[in-house]
Image (cartoon, rainbow, N blue to C red):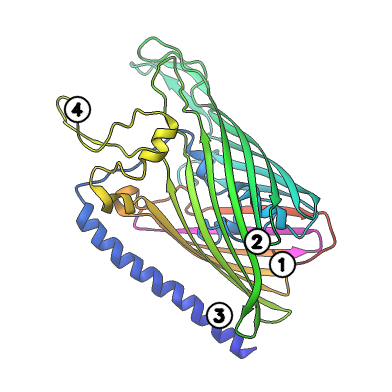
Amino acid sequence: MTKNINFILICCLSVFAFTAKGQTSSSKTVLDFAHKLNTITTSVPFLSITPDARAGGMGDAGVAVGADANAAFWNASKLAFAEKKKSFAINGAPWLRSLVNDVWLYYLSGYQKIDDRSAWSASMRYFSLGSIQFTDNNGNPLQQFTPSEYSIDGSYSRKLSDEFSVGIGLRFIYSNLAGRVVTQGGGQARPGIAGAGDLTTYWQHDGKFKEYKARYSWGATLTNVGNKITYTNSANRDFIPTMLRTGFCTKIDFDEFNSFATNIEFNKLLVPTPPQRDPISGKITKGMDPNVSVPQGMVQSFYDAPNGFKEEMSEINWILGIEYWYQKQFALRTGFHHEPYNKGNRKFFTFGVGLKYNVFGIDFAYLVPIQQRNPLENTLRFSIHFDFTSSTTTP
């Protein structure tokens, strides 16, 4: 048992050492890109917010960890390997809690195994942005409105072999940010509507790590591939957050009581990078025209950064997450999320706990920002899940 504890302590110290190295690199990045801030923005960013507290406790890593009721958000193909027949989860996350108390993200998700090789899932995401008073240019009140956004998802996954699976998902997106208020140009705002799809893969192998049982898993996903969205009658439309994710997880069972998993994950938005423009004429001086089709924008996102390869590499975020289980009933989690300075500078630690008893489980996650404020700081995210089987196998 002492040997196991020492190993866990060494791994935890490695996380902090790795993080310190990342911050040193970040300092260099700040110097190199201080005059080249070029953040990529999209419409309906709520689609990228981590909805569940399990992944939230591991730095927002979830593409390769074991399947649970929230797996469809991260990688639907994992559900073909799910060890529970069916599961359902309720998730909640307050947003901007340091400023307001009426902005929330809710996520309902569940899956059902069809047979030993396939599964289907359904989920709904709802983002309420609180109450807003709209006014005209003179400050006169126009209307009171509560903006909101939601998506409804469905997915199917199937094993192609004993160790590999694929999945496909479809998504309906509805974003109502201004009601029917009249815009400054005389037009009328309207809800934005879009459709999108996901393509996912997952590989899982049971083997050994020294003398211990181990499970190695890898996942890759292409999510939110869909049409552009607009909130007016304008022909100009905005990209939704099409995302490419890949990650690797190693889970080690030291004995029947203790298991330990490490996750490394990378993600990148497949959306055109804003070009540099002449401040007077508005003509592009460096980079590429972002007003392209969705397929062209996805391909172009790999080579259109105005400052070349170095900026392209800075568009990749990396995440390190750790999960420890004791007696398959109590979990401790931590993680670190890194986004380069010139692309938003979101760097934060996360911490989480989980409890499981028979068919019921609950998870909590807490975020500590570094260098920059975060909408999820000083908040406690939660997930409640129900597994409708008697199995207590650790995810």
Q: Amino acid at mark 3?
A: Ile
Q: Position of residue 201 (x, y in %)?
A: 59, 52
For the residues labelled 2 and 1, say whether their Cβ atoms are less than 8 Å apart: yes
**Picture layout, residue 262 above or below residue 67:** below
Residue to which mark 1 is pinned: 394
Give the magenta part as a residue range. Answer: 356-371
Q: Residue furthest bottom?
A: 2
Which disc is residue 66 wearing? 2
Main SS of the magenta part reads strand
Element class at badge 2:
loop
Disc 3 on helix, strand or loop?
A: helix
Q: Which sits in the foreground, 201 or 355?
A: 201
SS for callout 4: loop
* Amino acid type, callout 1: Thr
**Sequence-wise first label, 3 or 1:** 3
Mark toward the viewer: 2 or 1:
2
Closer to viewer: mark 4 or mark 3: 4
Distance, label 2 to label 3, CA atoms, is 20 Å
Neighbours of disc 2 within 10 Å: few (<14), some (14-19), many (20+)? many
Choose between 381 and 334: the one closer to the eye: 334
Select label 1 or label 4 by which is in front: 4
Would residue 291 be counted in the magenta stretch? no
Which labelled disc corresponds to residue 283?
Answer: 4
- The quadrant of the rendering that contains the N terminus is bottom right
Q: Name the residue tied to disc 3.
A: 8
